[in-house]
Amino acid sequence: MSDKNNHTLVNPQDGNLAFKIFYFENFCHFDHVQRLGYYSMILVQEGSGKLKADFSTHDFSANTLMCFSPYQPFMLEAANGIKGLCIHFHPDFFCIHKHQQETACNGVLFNNIYDPPLVRIEPSDTRQLIPIVDSMRTEIDNPGHSQYDLLMSQLKIFLILASRIKLGQHPKAAADFSGKQQPAILQDLKDAIEMHFKSKHTPGDYAGLLHISPKALAKLCKNHFNKTLTDLIAERIVIEAKRELYLTSKSVKEIAWELGYEDEYYFSRFFKRNAEISPQLYRDTVGFARSEGFITAEVFSIANAN
């Protein structure tokens, strides 16, 4: 049986984590860079500090939900102790891409290169979210018929509610953390990156499209996104590459070509430099090789938490 602070479901075929809830009373779990092969959601209920994620640093306080994709680097710094809970889930357990129509969390909670990977949670929101976590924890500790289906449904509800919370704060969600109003040209930049990231890979390309000097555009990006334009372009390309590695059986060479890279090896170096994992290793641990025969309830079992 899991201990009172750690509730874990594993895939017995490979011993890897499938789903986990754990409670923490300090930040020692997150005081070094995390690069986890699954999705993570951290709900800080007490305390404050700084979140370092990807290329940016953000302040956080009590009642903040943080969301991270597989292998997205992050760490927490806190002057005082923090208290809360964390949910981990592997894409084999719940694929946000496959359930995007129901949850709408991809691009909201996860894989959003423009907004901070955190959202403030009001007390009324907490009263909705915590009972769902409690129900999932109870189901892990006391499994019954169709455990996998029930846990997946409960996680889906949690993701839907969390997405609603963040969308309800939009468009001021990012401004709440940056304290700055975004110029209209930055929406044009977002649209341009979304339209052209497969063919245009340099800041100069987008400056030319928007009829603004590269220096001025770079300054706007740094001030409002706390990232360079090069970082934004690279993140968008990597997100698409990860999606292709996860959902398709395309070769790395095919994916590289579709993303505008004629040299597969150059693309692999680019991916590893930005994702800190090779495309093939990402696929082997998170992607298509594991998800093609999607795992069913029967292959999961409870593991004692160490």
Image: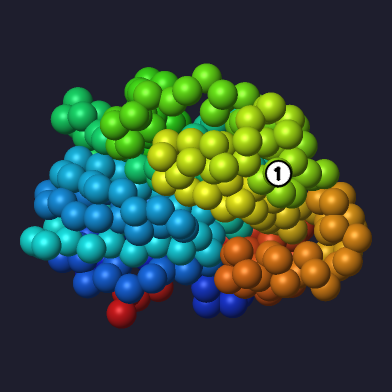
Decide which of 201, 9 is in the foreground and name it.
Answer: 201
Mark 1 neighbour class, 10 Å CA radius: few under 14, some 14 to 19, many 20 or more: some
Q: Amino acid at mark 1?
A: Gly
Residue at left offset 33%, top offset 36%: 178
Direction from residue 27 to residue 216 in the image, left or right = right
- Residue 73: horizontal and vertical position, in percent? 46, 63
Direction from residue 73 to residue 290 in the image, left or right = right
User: According to the image, label 1 marks what residue?
Assistant: 204
Q: Is residue 34 visible?
A: yes
Quarter of image, res 159: top left
Q: Check the picture and name the quadrant holding the C terminus.
A: bottom left
Q: How many marks?
A: 1
Residue at left offset 30%, top offset 55%: 51
Quarter of image, res 194: top right
* Whether residue 148 is situated above or below residue 285 in the rendered picture: above
Residue farthest along the bottom direction in this orientation: 306
Decide which of 271, 148 is in the foreground and name it.
Answer: 271
For mark 1, give the secondary structure: helix
Residue at left offset 74%, top offset 58%: 245
Q: Is residue 109 visible?
A: no
* Whether residue 17 is situated above or below residue 114 in the rendered picture: below
* Whether residue 215 is situated above or below residue 11 in the rendered picture: above
Q: Check the picture and name the quadrant holding the N terminus.
A: bottom left
- Residue 269: horizontal and vertical position, in percent? 72, 72
Residue at left offset 52%, top offset 73%: 16
- Residue 161: horizontal and vertical position, in percent? 38, 30
* Whether residue 16 is situated above or below residue 128 in the rendered picture: below
